[in-house]
Amino acid sequence: MGNSDTGSVLNEAGLDLVLLSNFVHQVVNPLNGVAGTLDNLAEGVVKEEFRREQRLRAARAQLEQCITLMRNLAFLAQGFRKLSDDERRKTVLPQVIIESAMFYQEDGKGKGIDIVLLNPEVQNRVTGHPELIRQVLMNIFDNSIKYSQKNSRVEIEQRIQRRTSMALITVRSTSQVPVSQNDINKLTELGFRGDNARKIVASGTGLGLYICRRILEDVHSGSLHIQLAPQNVIEITIKLPAGEAARRESRRG
């Protein structure tokens, strides 16, 4: 059985062989890179201290890619359910955004891509599952670094919508290759990879944005919106309920 949009092929057990093959490829490649880096460091091939530190940071980023992929597979395998009351915790938005972005800063630096939170001083909060919110952000930042135009910026804004109390996190990036509106509409489907993604990175799992959507919709009763803006800018907006605006300090006159 096949799927023309995602290219999936299911065996008798219902296992998507294309997805599995792509997943293995995406994990093995960075692990090979880490192994090569460790060999070079152990054998003294890289002598300058700043280059050794550079290689270690790059290896750390590669390992984080693998961890993200494994988490995505785990979320897919265990299914998605609403949060229980004891799983809900206050999460400071700028903190979770910065923590998620830090894993991709090194990889982005090599491509001249900066991840920038425009309003880090605004301490808005949301009630939810911090680890799952972090996973959503990491998936989005991972995609942004992979597919964004070199020497560009990934810009993030966070705010609380007064009328609905929804927490909104908007991530804007400039695609290296133009994206069609048809592909934008399918980006959160399981296993789907757009034409632009395949031109930049030959293989991928098509899991990241699908996992994001399921975590937001099924677990948090939130939503994920992706739209195309002028000049190949892709705008991704995360919406989470139970947002709390930062308290304004009263001025003493």
Image (cartoon, rainbow, N blue to C red):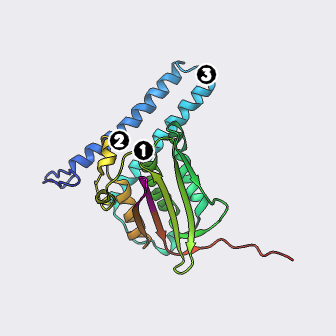
The secondary structure type at the circle numbered 1 is helix
In the rendered image of this protein, does residue 160 appear above or below residue 52? below
Q: Amino acid at mark 2?
A: Ile
The percent position of residue 69, horizontal first and vertical second, equals: 39, 48
- Residue displayed at 35% across by 37% down: 28
Marks 1/2: CA distance?
8 Å
The answer to whether residue 25 is left or right of residue 88 is left
First-in-chain label (1 vs 2): 1
What segment carries the magenta color? 228-236
Type of the residue with mark 3: Glu
Q: Position of residue 213 (x, y in %)?
A: 38, 64
Instruction: Tell me if residue 237 comes above or below residue 55 in the rendering.
Output: below
At 55% from the left and 21% from the top, the residue drawn is 46
Question: Which class describes the residues within 10 Å of circle 2: few (<14), some (14-19), or many (20+)?
Answer: few
Mark 1, other Cα within 10 Å: few <14 / some 14–19 / many ≥20:
many
Asked whether disc 1 touches disc 2, contact meaning CB atoms under 8 Å apart, the reply is yes
Q: CA distance from mark 3 to mark 2?
A: 32 Å
Confirm or deny contact between disc 3 and disc 2 (CB under 8 A).
no
Q: CA distance from mark 1 to mark 3?
A: 28 Å
In the rendered image, the quadrant that contains the C terminus is bottom right
Residue at which label 2 appears: 200
Residue 45 magenta-highlighted = no
Could you tell me if residue 75 is visible in this image? Answer: no
Query: What residue is pinned by disc 3?
Result: 48
SS at mark 2 in the image: helix
Residue matched to label 1: 146
**In front: 169, or 195?**
195
Q: What x and y, as percent, mark residue 25?
A: 31, 39
Q: Quadrant of residue 214?
A: bottom left
The percent coordinates of residue 195 (x first, y second) are: 29, 48
